[in-house]
Image (cartoon, rainbow, N blue to C red):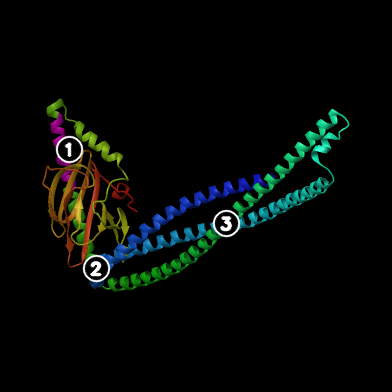
Amino acid sequence: MPILIRFLIFILSLAFCFSCFSQTKDDLKKQKLDLEKEISYTADLLNKTKSNKTKSLNYLRVLEKQIQSKQMLLATLNIEISLLNKQIKKTEQFILENKELILNEEKILQTLKDEYSKMIYAAYKQKGNRNDLMFIISSSDFNQAYKRIVYLKQYSAFRKNQASKINQSQKKLIKKKEKLAQKKESLIKAAVEKKLLVKNKKSELEGVSVKKDEKEKLINKLSNSEELFKKRLQDKKNYAKELDKRIRKIIEEEIRKAKEEAKKKEGNNKFSLTPEALALSAEFASNKGKLPWPLDKGIIIGKYGKQKHSIFSSVETFNNGIDIATNKNTVVRVVFDGIVSRIFFIKGEGKAVLINHGEYFSVYSGLKEVSVKTGEKLLSKEKIGVVITNEQENKTELHFEIWQGYDKQDPSNWLYNAY
């Protein structure tokens, strides 16, 4: 009995460990698939910009993103290999302990069989010398006859019980052996999977090394055009300032309009959102981290905030939003319900759309076409335009911002699964 209890406890603990492993393994598989999709997408974008890579910073930014994704995939593979190693060790331990348990139970079963065999043999020998009925009738008195009847019944019950015990023990042993065979099969599969993961890891390591070499060579080539790129950087800074200025002016106008409305209705000069706008603001805020992307496909190659330049480390830039690289003619969509506040044009960068979400505003710039009008009400994921492609730099990129009143927000904190 103690052996059986120990076996059951071990099975339950092992099952719990395997369920935890399975859950972690499923998460890792999903993460791995997402990273592989991202690597494939960046590879596609790199192929499209390859012909122009010597004069395009965009190629370098996409290349850096692919290197990051490959490094993350390597980290995921490392974790998966580590978990598989643990699973293999646990399965090996399970097999060893169960082999020992099976041997012990086989010994117990053999003892039961031997005892039963002796009992049957003894019964057979006694049967030859006497008859059960005569054995009872030959009793000296009624009391002795009763005791002999009870003895014969108990002896018969004991034989049946021994036979049942042997049968049950045999069934349990068969089940344990089947379980052991399954675990051996699982161990073989895990070992094969581990070999494949190790092979993939080596392949990814080689891939990262190749991409890093390509990055270094490209940086060296681009460094020779320092003046050209510094001029482009300055143009970009000027564009960012112009965009910031226009956005602030529009937001000021929106707030002024709200104040005028509040003054008419309530006789005060305080900024007050309408109940509809308040509800929209609350709903927008509650969706932080869950907003859909402004593009169906794309990768973030420009993060929010202060950044060091890829080539000129002494140069720092500040990004008011995020930059998303995508394919040519990709549709831009609104990330939440709102009203189109303004559509405006910035020289060299295409059109921009600012959408009001109550207290919040979303900005989409770098559009060649706009399919909405000022004052139009939009629903989440509704088309607002198409991304422009800079043919000179072979760059198709959307600049996306989120504001709360006059305060800029990091859009990656608002979009679903941004990083």
Q: Is residue 262 left or right of residue 153?
A: left
Residue found at the very far right of the displayed protein: 140
Disc with the residue nearer the chain's start (2 vs 1) = 2
Residue highlighted by disc 2:
48
Disc with the residue nearer the chain's start (3 vs 1) = 3
Residue found at the very far top of the displayed protein: 267
* Neighbourhood count class around disc 2 (C-alpha, 10 Å): few under 14, some 14–19, many 20 upward: some
Q: Is residue 261 magenta?
A: yes
Q: Nearer the viewer, mark 2 or mark 1?
A: 2
The quarter in which the C terminus is drawn is bottom left
Q: Secondary structure at mark 3?
A: helix
Determine the CA span between mark 3 and mark 2: 48 Å
Q: Is residue 200 left or right of residue 120?
A: left
The amino acid on which the numbered mark 3 sits, given as a three-letter code, is Thr
The stretch in magenta equals 247-262
Instruction: Work out whether 265 lies above or below 66.
Output: above
How far across and how far down the image is residue 73, in percent? 41, 61
Q: Is residue 18 left or right of residue 41?
A: right
Q: Nearer the viewer, mark 3 or mark 1?
A: 3
The quarter in which the N terminus is drawn is top right
Residue 180: quarter of image? bottom right
The amino acid on which the numbered mark 2 sits, given as a three-letter code, is Lys
Q: Main secondary structure of the magenta part?
A: helix
How far across and how far down the image is residue 138, in percent? 86, 35
Decide if residue 163 is in sight here: yes
Residue highlighted by disc 1:
255
Residue highlighted by disc 3:
91
Q: Residue at x 26, y 57 (%)?
A: 297
* Neighbourhood count class around disc 1 (C-alpha, 10 Å): few under 14, some 14–19, many 20 upward: some
Q: Is residue 59 magenta?
A: no
Instruction: Tally the numbered discs.
Output: 3
How far across and how far down the image is residue 411, in percent? 28, 49
